[in-house]
Amino acid sequence: MTERKAAVFLWFDTEAEAAAEFYAVTFPDSHVDRIVRLRGETPSGPAGSVQVVEMTLLGLPYALLNAGPQVRPNDAYSLQVYTDDQAETD
């Protein structure tokens, strides 16, 4: 079984890591868990730049995505559901 079953997913242009660091020092029971970097050039950014930051915010799992300038900030969020295999997803 996976450790996390779901996470709130927030989209950013390029500020996901800075936002995660700010949240981690501002709110109790908050910390950055993992940073995933781009392996190659994409519309979201150059190779080596931050793609996703997984963090705990007030004890809850969050994923922050740098989606690039084509994504304008808004009030929306999505949920990411973690599954162990395709059968669980189905």
Image (spheres, helix red, strand yellow):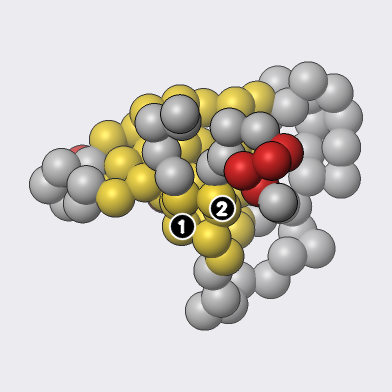
Q: Is residue 72 left or right of residue 1?
A: right
Q: Residue at horizontal 78%, vertical 20%?
A: 39
Q: Is residue 85 above or below residue 11?
A: above
Q: Residue at horizontal 57%, vertical 65%?
A: 78
Helix, strand or loop at mark 1: strand
Q: Nearer the viewer, residue 54 or 17?
A: 54
Badge 2 crowding class, 10 Å Cα cut-off, few under 14, some 14 to 19, many 20 or more, is some
Q: Residue at horizontal 66%, vertical 33%?
A: 85
Instruction: Report if the CB atoms under discs 1 and 2 are less than 8 Å apart.
Output: yes
Question: Is residue 32 visible from the viewing direction of this image?
Answer: yes
Q: Amino acid at mark 2?
A: Gln
Helix, strand or loop at mark 2: strand
Q: Where residue 88 sits: x, y (%)? A: 62, 43
The label number, if any, that marks residue 64 in the structure image: none
Q: Is residue 71 left or right of residue 21?
A: right
Q: Where residue 24 sits: x, y (%)? A: 26, 42
Q: Is residue 56 above or below residue 71?
A: above
Q: Where residue 82 sits: x, y (%)? A: 55, 42
Q: Where residue 46 sits: x, y (%)? A: 80, 30
Nearer the N terminus, badge 1 or badge 2?
1
The label number, if any, that marks residue 8 in the structure image: 1
Q: Is residue 39 left or right of residue 88?
A: right
The residue to which callout 2 is attached is 80
Examine the image and state in which quarter residue 42 appears: top right
Badge 1 crowding class, 10 Å Cα cut-off, few under 14, some 14 to 19, many 20 or more, is some
Q: Amino acid at mark 1?
A: Val
Q: Quadrant of the N terminus?
A: top left
Query: Of all residues shown, which one is farthest toward the left?
Result: 28
Circle count: 2
